[in-house]
Image (cartoon, rainbow, N blue to C red):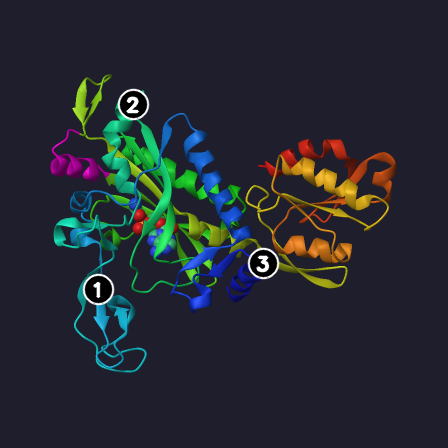
Amino acid sequence: MEKVVNLCKRRGFVYPGSEIYGGLGSSLDYGPLGVELKRNVKEAWWREIVTGRDDVVGLDAAVIMHPRVWEASGHLAGFTDPLVDCKGCKQRFRADQVAGARCPECGGELTEARQFNLMFKTFVGPVEDTAHVAYLRPETAQSMFVNFRNVLETSRLKLPFGIGQIGRSFRNEITPGNFLFRTREFEQMELEFFVRPGEDEQWYDYWRHARFEWYVRLGIARDRLRLRPHAGDELAHYAKGCVDVEYAFPFGWSELEGIANRTDFDLKRHSEYSGKDLTYFDEERRERYFPYVIEPAAGADRSTLAFLVDAYDEDEVEGEARIVLRLHPRLAPYKAAVFPLLRKDGQPERARRIYDTLRRHFPVDYDQAGSIGRRYRRQDEVGTPFGITVDHDTMKDGTVTLRDRDAMTQVRLPEDRLVEELGARIERP
Ligand code: GAP
């Protein structure tokens, strides 16, 4: 973990948030390469879940919703963690994470546990009183239930269909930590898939399988992933069943995504609290009912961390140690880097021209500083899958070498075939 965290800081993937002011607990900023990696993770999800399917549409809803939403969803009453305070050092802990009755930091006496709501509170408008209290959403899911009727009325979707959303959520976690794994603001990638009651079990099976395979297809080792069903006492109040996709992080098996059968709980509750009819009329069956919901709920930051950890590798090339991020080409921040072998004989100008052409199609880097070995190594470390070198032969016959980060093979090809060749290699299954 420490190696990944260091690499992230050193190469501009992730910085400590507000660092020049001493940082703010578990707030993290994505740097130039991190923002590309995370965007690619979200894009891969969106393509798979939304645009790649004819039965799912997207949504981008407001973070601050009507406070009644959180009454209906159960978050106001139940989205809590048990909290204990140390009477000595005043530190706070999650009661379920301290063993015994004494403070793990100073040994002081702990208070009785009390429930602490994890929602961030704010006020809408200039008056700071209870009538103006609002919350930053703790999950993106609720806006998809609240917009169920809007989507139904403005599209021609019939059950089964889904609404997908990627967006920021906020939880005032008592114990954030493990780098990107648990923070107080994070991005979720959630799908609410509405189905006929009675067909929910079959869709629940479908989605847990589909979601597991998504991580595998994007490069995560199958044996470092598992599906862990929730035990009865772990189930959220709305769920009939839930299974987590877990990854074997260096700090232990931990959740990347939960796939839950939320039944008709949410639509029913929002119907009840809003007084609006959120039922669905099934023309085939000639009946009206509340659809059931299967919800694959993933975290963009957690999966970015898993992709980073899983891709991290150290090996030796020609007697020299190298760090390499074996990221799937679709996720890699740069798809290729262009290098002139020499900084003379017109090679830098030619390499720049190739770089300018490729940049119109893919994010690409250009590097002419230092030995070619060092330049390859710099790119390996940030996961760039392909290296393109312009050399003496390029100047004669217009061919370049294309180096593969993982196979370490080099092939020669005409520079005007690069766009097509890179496109095919990036999209490899
Ligand atoms: N709508 C259901 C829901 O929100 P969840 O298991 O609480 O379910 C879904 O959250 C996903 O959101 C998690 O699997 C995780 O990837 C991500 N997530 C939740 N809390 C997080 C946090 N504090 N930091 C980073 N990611 C988080």
**Disc 1 residue type?**
Pro
In the structure shown, which secondary structural element does the residue marked by tag 1 occupy? strand
Q: Residue at x 77, y 45 (%)?
A: 389
**Disc 3 residue type?**
Arg
**Disc 2 marks which residue?**
154
Q: Earlier in the sequence, mark 3 or mark 1?
A: 3
Q: Earlier in the sequence, mark 2 or mark 3?
A: 3
**Disc 1 marks which residue?**
82
**Disc 2 residue type?**
Thr
* Pointers 3 and 1 in contact (C-beta within 8 Å): no
Taking the image as shown, residue 296 lies to the left or right of residue 311, namely: left
* Residue situated in front as seen by the camera: 168 or 289: 168
Q: Residue at x 27, y 70 (%)?
A: 93
The mark found on residue 219 in the picture is none
Secondary structure character of the magenta stretch overall: helix
The reply to whether the residue tagged 1 has its Cβ within 8 angstroms of ligand 1 is no
* Residue situated in front as seen by the camera: 335 or 159: 335
Quarter where residue 372 is shown: bottom right
Check the image and report above or below for 232 versus 116.
above
Q: CA separation, marks 3 and 1?
A: 38 Å
Residue 259 point in image, percent of width and height: 34, 44
Q: Is 268 contained in the magenta span?
A: yes
Q: Is 78 contained in the magenta span?
A: no
- In the image as oriented, which residue stretches furthest toward the front? 126
Please provide the residue range marked out in magenta: 263-277
Taking the image as shown, residue 155 lies to the left or right of residue 50, namely: left
* Residue situated in front as seen by the camera: 414 or 262: 414
**Disc 3 marks which residue?**
11
Q: CA separation, marks 1 and 2?
A: 42 Å
Q: Earlier in the sequence, mark 1 or mark 2?
A: 1
Could you tell me which quadrant the C terminus lies in? top right
